[in-house]
Amino acid sequence: MASSTVDQSQVARNGLREKVLTLNSMNPRVRRVEYAVRGPIVQRALELEQELRQGVKKPFTEVIRANIGDAQAMGQRPITFLRQVLALCVNPDLLNSPNFPDDAKKRAERILQACGGHSLGAYSISSGIQLIREDVAQYIERRDGGIPADPNNVFLSTGASDAIVTVLKLLVAGEGHTRTGVLIPIPQYPLYSATLAELGAVQVDYYLEEERAWALDVAELHRALCQARDHCRPRALCVINPGNPTGQVQTRECIEAVIRFAFQERLFLLADEVYQDNVYAVGSQFHSFKKVLMEMGPPYAVQQELASFHSTSKGYMGECGFRGGYVEVVNMDPAVQQQMLKLMSVRLCPPVPGQALLDLVVSPPAPTDPSYMQFQAEKQAVLAELAAKARLTEQVFSEAPGISCNPVQGAMYSFPRMQLPPRAVQRAQELGLAPDMFFCLCLLEETGICVVPGSGFGQREALALTARPPTPKLQLLLEKLTRFHAKFTVEYS
Amino acid sequence: MNPQVKAVEYAVRGPIVLKAGEIELELQRGIKKPFTEVIRANIGDAQAMGQQPITFLRQVMALCTYPNLLDSPSFPEDAKKRARRILQACGGNSLGSYSASQGVNCIREDVAAYITRRDGGVPADPDNIYLTTGASDGISTILKILVSGGGKSRTGVMIPIPQYPLYSAVISELDAIQVNYYLDEENCWALNVNELRRAVQEAKDHCDPKVLCIINPGNPTGQVQSRKCIEDVIHFAWEEKLFLLADEVYQDNVYSPDCRFHSFKKVLYEMGPEYSSNVELASFHSTSKGYMGECGYRGGYMEVINLHPEIKGQLVKLLSVRLCPPVSGQAAMDIVVNPPVPGEESFEQFSREKESVLGNLAKKAKLTEDLFNQVPGIHCNPLQGAMYAFPRIFLPAKAVEAAQAHQMAPDMFYCMKLLEETGICVVPGSGFGQREGTYHFRMTILPPVEKLKTVLQKVKDFHINFLEKYA
């Protein structure tokens, strides 16, 4: 591929020299990285927004960004208590203000006491403020019905993404046939494929079963693993539960089967559980991998290596911008755990405001606290709306011909499958685009709706769209989308 | 596990700091020691050592965090104005939304305006500004994108010795080749282009040197490079076709009246189009240092110029995988680059607080330099800038032997003894790199003046005892 869009004569004319850093000279692994959630379709959406601002006429008056799981960007309000405590931490003069409830003040003081110089502005230790790690451990224990969690196994991080990358980084070794392979679900949240590309690890795909509400089948894990052993050394298995983009919530039996499989095949388990507070479907329940693992007893409980991830970005909090998160590691080799801490120390520490927010998420107001009622009301309102939107989405899609959508059991996305007529597929190929990318680009140009093509997650002829927009807007979006699909189908028949 | 990770070292939070942590726990448990507290003089964390945050900055942050406060009479109008501006630029008018991966637009514009002002009108394009999770994040990202090749064509990265060990750690992790160039201790840690030349020539034997990292003002050394030196470095980078990284996080920390901060960007521009259109330069800044000391917010930016147009897309793509830097850190950066101006309500208090912090640091820099130079067996170069002293310690042969017997670097041995006997935690020079056979340690000048005087006295007493013990 040409390394420069500037030809040599132009270089000579302008006195411009060849760059040190070009496509050819850059890190080849970085070149291979793709991240669809903020990929080309989003770039185009930004351009269109710019054009609208400049007054260019379009068949729509606004771009509806349904591509990213960002609640507050779409109008969801932050939880009052969280922001009150954080404001008190940021500006402790406010501790004298009558406009803040006592319990918020108490929390702020508690957090500040645990900070260097009693300030959010000091670095923390690299694994995160000790007090907060203890609170996280207690949260995990409560969540898991009393199964103990050790604060020393809890590491705070800059969003869950940061911790996931750190753990994957530790795992990658070997060369050629012994290069580390990592099993990831298809469809997946593309952080995984991007990170594996960046680390030069081998991506090993296992397919979730669309026909069975995106269930994880251990037989498929076996298939993927056996094929992978030909060309790499599989060492890790990533599970996203509740799923992104698929929204499925795995059953307890499934989780047990996955753990048994990981144990038998000696795979390090990564459990991405950032949507653990987002479970909507009646009959679905979140089971943490940690809990199930411990309840399975030895040898699993004492030997199976597991890293579980959580974040402040999702749930009912939606505090994406604060980049709060943690990982709990279980049964990790102590020497490796030291190495992980060392790796984290190079970046000093996760953002302290994010750590503070996480603390409030894991230790919310108690029933006897003044802020309890409002907190609960706000939390329930958010979750109820998400559940309603999940149902609305399912309903609209299931009624649309040529579109089918699995039940949205959890998370905050729907991942409908669309039938695309052969002529559309052909046109896409002519343009060098995946068919669903072609569909999404057309959708964007004509309706202003920005969703991510399924091929960005590993699935063909599908879309990932968030249930994030407020209900009336979501309703509008769904109607426009299904109408557009019908029109598109006719146009390319 | 990943062998590259195993090879990583980061002394600033390394073994001596872990030991300090253990000792603190012992103190908490009531175990008797020759001291009552551990003094963490290992890390450039001003607020941890008692420096107060800038009022205006925290006011704007609080308003952004909890916008109900915009109705409160306790906040000045200029703070509210800034907060509204920031919030309007955020998705859903909230710090809780992800921003664009390059950072919030209006903040990038503000950063560009700051750079232009700082550099006397030399233009900065917001499109070349990337907000980052502290400067470390930006440095790490740029290095990552630069590293390629294999065997003898593996990318070589030139770094100063002594260096801030982020550089060696990232180079290790990326499996790039570290190419050391030595700063001249006899000459106030000056950067000598002949030494750069020596280093790059030798390196060409076994790698493909592509990158030159400069830290100015220096860490751990505190030297502030002259304008002439910066020009020479730029010319050298142009000649040798090296991508320049200018780590300028201490640009607000210049104390010596004979020194001035000159940004690489400005000097590059003023050298004319042959240089300014060609030399690829990434300059880094942060909210962690200066007079702000907002380390915990992880705010930072990089200005990257003369990138190949196709590389920009690659860079943004790489950043996008981590979504965005913490928005509260971006907001903090905004206030740093867009502080109160004369005529604004908060200007006086802001100026006072800023001058107080910087004046204090300058005083402590001089105090430290002077005191260390009074101690036989310690020599400390002038602390022209940054926030550290990096004195040279002359260790008797017996001490070196004792260290070897303990399988430690001699300066690590010295620092461990210092920690155990006085509770003072500093970082041995071996963690930053130094000429063979020389020993140093890095100590911050951040404790409050009175405490600093005590610390310096204790170090002096310890050193004299140490010399006697190992005479």
Image (spheres, rainbow, N blue to C red):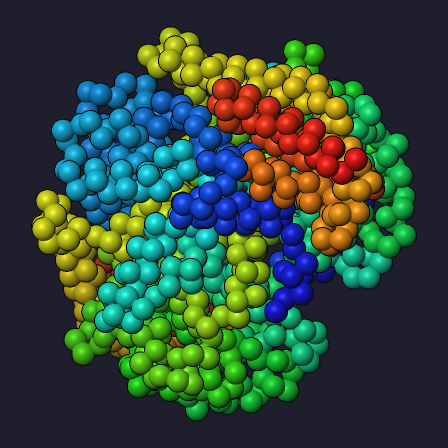
- Residue beneath the point at 47% across and 15% down: B356
- Residue beneath the point at 28% across and 75% down: A287
B19 and A31: which one is in front? B19
- Residue beneath the point at 65% across and 61% down: B6
Residue closest to the far top: B343
Expressed as whole percent of the image width and height from the top left, the position of residue A47 reads 45, 46
The answer to which image quadrant residue A338 occupies is bottom right
A444 left or right, relative to A434:
left
Q: From this view, report whether residue B226 is shown above or below residue A37.
A: above
Q: From this view, report whether residue A96 is shown above or below residue B245.
A: above
The answer to which image quadrant residue B219 occupies is top right
Image label count: 0
- The C terminus of chain B - image quarter: top right
Expressed as whole percent of the image width and height from the top left, the position of residue A124 reads 44, 44
Q: From this view, report whether residue B319 is shown above or below residue A228.
A: above
B437 left or right, relative to B296:
right
B48 left or right, relative to B378:
left
A96 and B364: which one is in front? B364
- The N terminus of chain B - image quarter: bottom right
- Residue beneath the point at 33% across and 45% down: A356
Expressed as whole percent of the image width and height from the top left, the position of residue A347 reads 54, 47
The answer to which image quadrant residue A413 occupies is bottom left
Expressed as whole percent of the image width and height from the top left, the position of residue A249 reads 29, 75
